[in-house]
Amino acid sequence: MDGAPALARWLGTGSAARAAPTFDDLERLPYARMVAEESMRLYPPAYVFSRRADYWTEPDTFTPERFAPGASGKDAADRPKHAYLPFGGGPRICIGNSFAMMEHAIVLAAATRHWRLESIPGHIVRTEPRITLRPRGGLPMRVMRR
Ligand code: HEM
């Protein structure tokens, strides 16, 4: 993902000068919602399989655009329900689902408003499935003020 244009799309010009985003800003932050959804597809904390090539275009790539309204082909919103289950399903589906996704998008927009985060060149992120999925040895990042 090319972060800069993507961020410009989320936040618009001058966003750093505005107050921190809140629930009321969510509808103006569609890209933050798409990033949250794509993160939950590739790295669902409760590890479920959501990388099937028969359900997703290039399933191993991080492509928030697949969650854009009107995405077509395999990534269309009418994909089978069981293709995307970060919050489980059926009668025991996570009750924090909507709250968690709102929080994810707001925190992402709030953090990236002032800071630019980059992975450390050469650091390979490896997953560690414990009770929840986590990055093995943490996730070192370089943090720069925008
Ligand atoms: C990214 C964040 C979260 C993820 C990925 C997640 C994922 C899940 C999953 C996979 C289940 C099991 C569903 C099943 O058995 O089919 C679950 C259950 C549950 N989650 Fe979450 N969850 C998240 C955040 C939250 C939050 C913020 C809350 C509360 C505010 C919450 C409360 C619950 C509860 C109470 C259950 C048990 C539901 C039941 O057994 O009836 N979760 N969650």
Image: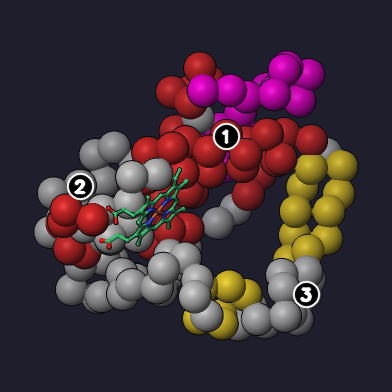
Q: Secondary structure at mark 3?
A: loop
Q: Quadrant of residue 86?
A: bottom left
Name the amino acid, label 1.
Ile
Report the mark closest to the observer, 2 or 3: 2
Which of the marked residues, 2 or 1, is nearer the chain's N terminus?
2
**Which residue lies at the image location 29% right of the left edge and 37% below the top edge?**
69
Residues at discs 2 and 3 in contact (Cβ within 8 Å) = no
Q: Secondary structure at mark 2?
A: loop
**Which residue lies at the image location 62% right of the left edge and 24% below the top edge?**
21
Q: Quadrant of residue 99?
A: top left
**Which residue lies at the image location 61% right of the left edge and 42% below the top edge?**
108
Which of the marked residues, 2 or 3, is nearer the chain's N terminus?
2
**Does the numbered disc 2 mark a residue whose Cβ is under 8 Å from ligand 1?**
no
Pointer 2 local density, CA inside 10 Å: few below 14, some 14–19, many at least 20: some
The residue tagged 1 is 106
Q: Is residue 15 visible?
A: yes
Report the mark closest to the observer, 1 or 3: 1
Q: CA distance from mark 1 to mark 3?
A: 27 Å
Q: Image quadrant for the N terminus?
A: bottom right
Name the amino acid, label 2.
Ala
Relative to 49, say whether 111 is above or below.
Answer: above
The residue tagged 3 is 121
**Does the numbered disc 3 mark a residue whose Cβ is under 8 Å from ligand 1?**
no
Report the mark closest to the observer, 2 or 1: 1
In the rendered structure, does residue 127 fall within the stretch colored magenta? no
The residue tagged 2 is 77
Q: Position of residue 133 (x, y in %)?
A: 51, 73
Q: Which residues are magenta?
A: 5-23
